[in-house]
Image (spheres, rainbow, N blue to C red):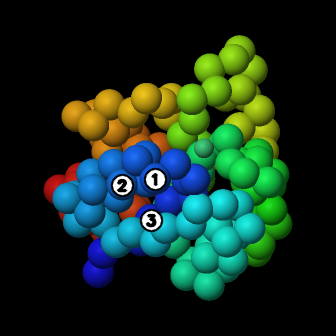
Amino acid sequence: MKNKILIIEDNEQNMYMLTYLLQNENYEIIQAYNGTTGIVAAKESTPDIILLDIQLPGMDGYTVAVKIREIEKLKQTPIIAVTSYAMPGDKEKAIESGASGYIEKPINPDTFVSQMEAFLPRELLLKRGNLL
Ligand code: MN
């Protein structure tokens, strides 16, 4: 069974790139273009992984992370913040909000998937056969 990744990202080009890279690695992708629809999609689809842009229209990614962590079945789901905010303290703020990891934009297409997988729990990688 494919692992499901929910991508919450408002930029069309970034969404396209992330979707392309991850589908290539055999992940199933669910897309949301803002925090509100992202939270609904997270509840409905129970993804294995959530990629979360911080700079979103309306509700920012920090708030989205906090709200996702309030959902019982999503308390342990890896949330990876993907953001071009490069101010000191942003990474810490993302982690405090409930993110499990942080990847800076612009993303590097050659390394993005392994960067993301570095934040995933061992049992999820085992399920994918990545650790065989
Ligand atoms: Mn954005």
Residue 5 numbered mark, or none: 3
| CB atoms of marks 1 and 2 within 8 Å | yes
Query: Residue at position x 62%, y 20% from top?
Result: 86
- Quadrant of the rendered structure where residue 35 is? bottom right
Residue 12 numbered mark, or none: 1
Amino acid type assigned to the residue bearing label 2 in the image: Tyr
Give the foreground label among 3 and 2.
Answer: 2
In the displayed orientation, state which residue is furthest to the bottom: 44
Amino acid type assigned to the residue bearing label 3 in the image: Ile
The secondary structure type at the circle numbered 3 is strand
- The C terminus lies in quadrant: bottom left
Please name the residue that numbered disc 2 is placed on.
16
Is 80 left or right of 4, judged from the image as shown? right
- The N terminus lies in quadrant: bottom left
Which x, y percent locates residue 84?
A: 57, 29
Q: Residues within 10 Å of mark 1 (few under 14, many from 20)?
A: few
Q: Is residue 1 above or below residue 111?
A: below
Give the foreground label among 3 and 1.
Answer: 1
Query: Residue at position x 46%, y 71% from top?
Result: 30
